[in-house]
């Protein structure tokens, strides 16, 4: 086991990508599972608070400790098994996402939910129930979990399967641990959340599996030490487009219509093909301006851009789909002829680099600023999204603040990034941030579609679900962690 106490050595572990800064006595880096379990048992017996760390790319301060010890999973990074016939991979929590993606790609497979930040660890992806651009078609990490091994706060390890036996049939959650102890509670009735993505608080639903409780629990109920994940075969071909729009209303209309024609089959000769994107991603004008020196081919005077991708089964289908898409695109924008098209791997990689450069440039601006980035993660129902976003845009334009919006618009999910330049702007940014979250919640949506609550968004958990439900969630946490040692400060104060 590696132990670090020197501040110079541990300071990188005391922050995450939200820039929240914490403190702890030491960082412990177990080199195998036995060491990890021993550390956890030691913490439990000696009442030492501990926080689990993945890659530290979280955006809500989840892995940032404020006391006790930080346990990094970085050395538990083995790909333990891969079964192409049965389409699964078994991994340890410290496997870096990009390493897993490269491994799977070399075997002709992929793990569909793809957080943009590929330096994240698979344990972090599971603890946050992360998603990403392809979630539009494929869902979130939860949809790919077949089994999990979790070390509970007292050091007991449980192996959980997504099987009928381990399904919670009614509202009574009752799990018998190997040690003979039982964890029991009544699943509270959460208010209905009217958006296709939501990671606010614990996942508590009748019909859930026991393992579902740990997915998205942000390191508060147990430490994920092994995961068996379903993987998909790589599609034969993928086509991608980055489309530029002169008007926001046309871009929003394009999204609605593109989703609407998913089922509208079009026949072309003997072949049938229909538009069916696997991702629909949005970038506002300010985001495009931020990377315009790197990409001079972005047309002048554009209002926004949308990136779409679709999978094709063969060359014939690719050809038909290319012309279907270009015809469809031409109905919505005068920049149709300047659409970027990707059909080859290296072109798709360039699109992904373009996508990644936008948040990277924003983080560079934040690093130069005296203020933190104020970043949101809201999602609402498709039916109300266009009006919701138009209202937000008006508010932002009037404010004269420095802002950037991008997001997974296929899921009616956006990230607003505000970077204040002085104290007045900081106050105004906080106000707009609050207002657009309250607006989303009042529409039945969520403040947390994929990033979680961590330490930075706790007040919105209560706003969304109410005091009573949050109290019940806290009581569930205490069933697993009666001494409140694990991931202190995440979700609950
Ligand atoms: C540029 C950028 C783009 C991003 N894009 C996306 C995106 O598209 N979609 C998305 O969902 N997120 C995105 N994120 C957020 C972040 O990458 C994800 O939340 C990611 O899954 C966090 O993983 P991590 O390993 O870095 O976790 P960390 O930040 O280390 O930890 C996150 C939380 O998980 C807990 N945790 C970590 N490992 C374990 C474990 N083994 N057992 C129990 N708890 C654990 C920690 O205690 C903490 O609460 C982005 C972040 C950045 C900086």
Image: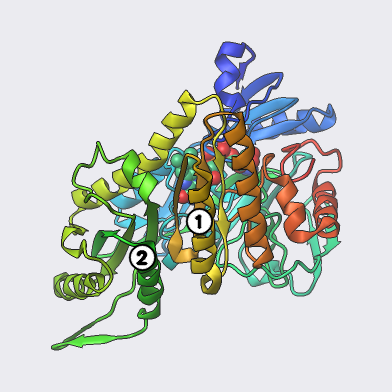
Q: In x, y percent, where is residue 405?
A: 45, 50
Q: Which residue is denoted by mark 1 in the rendering?
A: 394
Which element is circle 2 on?
helix
Q: In x, y percent, where is residue 329?
A: 25, 70
Question: Residue at the location (35% across, 70% down)?
Answer: 254
Q: In x, y percent, where is residue 474?
A: 82, 50
Question: Residue at the location (41% across, 73% down)?
Answer: 256
> As rendered, which of 226 and 235 lies closer to the eye?
235
Q: In x, y percent, where is residue 117?
A: 44, 42
Q: Left of 426 or right of it: where is 249?
A: left
Few, some or many C-alpha atoms within 10 Å of disc 2 (few <14, some 14-19, many ≥20)?
many
Inspect this view and state whether residue 410 appears. yes
Q: Give the quarter of the figure containing the N terminus.
A: top right
Q: Left of 394 or right of it: where is 10?
A: right
The quadrant of the picture showing ligand 1 is top right
Q: Give the quarter of the figure containing the C terminus.
A: top right
Query: Residue 274 got which mark?
Result: none
Q: Which residue is denoted by mark 2 in the rendering?
A: 251
Which element is circle 1 on?
helix
Tell me, yes or no, whether the two marked residues, 1 and 2, touch with CB atoms within 8 Å: no
Few, some or many C-alpha atoms within 10 Å of disc 1 (few <14, some 14-19, many ≥20)?
few
> As rendered, which of 68 and 196 lies closer to the eye?
196
- Residue 54 appears in which quarter of the rendering? top right
Inspect this view and state whether residue 62 appears. no
260 up-or-down from 188: above or below = below
Q: Left of 328 or right of it: where is 210?
A: right
Q: Earlier in the sequence, mark 1 or mark 2?
A: 2
């Amino acid at each position: 086991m590696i132990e670090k106490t020197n501040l110079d050595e541990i300071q990188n572990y005391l922050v995450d990508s939200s820039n929240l800064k914490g403190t702890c006595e030491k960082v412990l880096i177990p080199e195998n599972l036995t060491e990890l379990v021993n550390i956890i048992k030691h913490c439990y017996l000696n009442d030492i608070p501990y926080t689990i760390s993945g890659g530290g790319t979280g955006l809500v301060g989840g892995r940032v400790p404020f006391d006790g010890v930080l346990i990094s999973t970085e050395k538990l990074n083995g790909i333990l098994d891969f079964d192409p016939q049965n389409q699964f991979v078994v991994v340890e929590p410290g496997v870096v996402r990009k390493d897993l993606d490269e491994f799977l790609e070399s075997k002709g497979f992929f793990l569909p939910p793809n957080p943009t930040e590929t330096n994240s660890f698979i344990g972090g992806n599971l603890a946050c129930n992360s998603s990403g651009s392809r979630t539009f078609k494929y869902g979130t990490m939860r949809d790919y979990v077949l089994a999990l091994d979790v070390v509970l706060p007292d050091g007991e390890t449980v192996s959980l399967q997504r099987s009928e036996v381990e399904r919670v049939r009614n509202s009574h959650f009752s799990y018998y641990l190997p040690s003979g102890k039982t964890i029991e509670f009544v699943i509270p009735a959460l208010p209905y959340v009217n958006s296709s993505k939501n990671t606010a608080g614990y996942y508590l639903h009748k019909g859930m599996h026991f393992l579902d409780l740990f997915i998205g629990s942000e390191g508060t109920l147990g430490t994920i030490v092994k995961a068996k994940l379903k993987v998909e075969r790589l599609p034969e071909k993928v086509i991608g487009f980055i489309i530029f729009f002169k008007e926001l209303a046309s871009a929003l209309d394009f999204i609605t219509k593109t989703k609407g024609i998913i089922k509208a089959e079009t026949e072309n000769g003997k072949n049938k093909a229909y538009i069916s994107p696997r991702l629909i991603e949005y970038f506002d004008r300010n985001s495009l301006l931020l990377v315009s020196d790197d990409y001079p081919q972005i047309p002048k005077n554009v209002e926004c851009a949308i990136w779409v991708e679709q999978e094709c089964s063969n060359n014939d289908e690719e050809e038909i789909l290319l012309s279907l898409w270009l015809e469809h695109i031409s109905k919505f924008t005068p920049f149709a002829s300047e659409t970027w098209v990707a059909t080859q791997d290296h072109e798709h990689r360039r699109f992904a680099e373009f996508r990644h450069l936008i948040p990277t440039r924003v983080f560079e601006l934040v690093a130069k600023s005296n203020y933190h980035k104020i970043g949101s993660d809201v999602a609402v129902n498709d039916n109300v999204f266009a009006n919701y976003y138009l209202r937000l845009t008006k508010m932002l334009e009037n404010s004269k603040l420095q802002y950037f919006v991008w997001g997974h618009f296929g899921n009616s999910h956006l990230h607003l990034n505000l970077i204040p330049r002085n104290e007045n702007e900081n106050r105004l940014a906080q106000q707009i941030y609050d207002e657009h979250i309250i607006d989303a919640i009042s529409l039945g949506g969520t403040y947390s579609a994929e990033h979680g609550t961590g330490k930075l968004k706790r007040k919105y958990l209560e706003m969304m679900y109410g005091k009573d439900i949050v109290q019940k969630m806290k009581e569930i946490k205490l069933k697993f962690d009666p001494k409140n040692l694990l991931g202190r400060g995440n979700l609950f104060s």
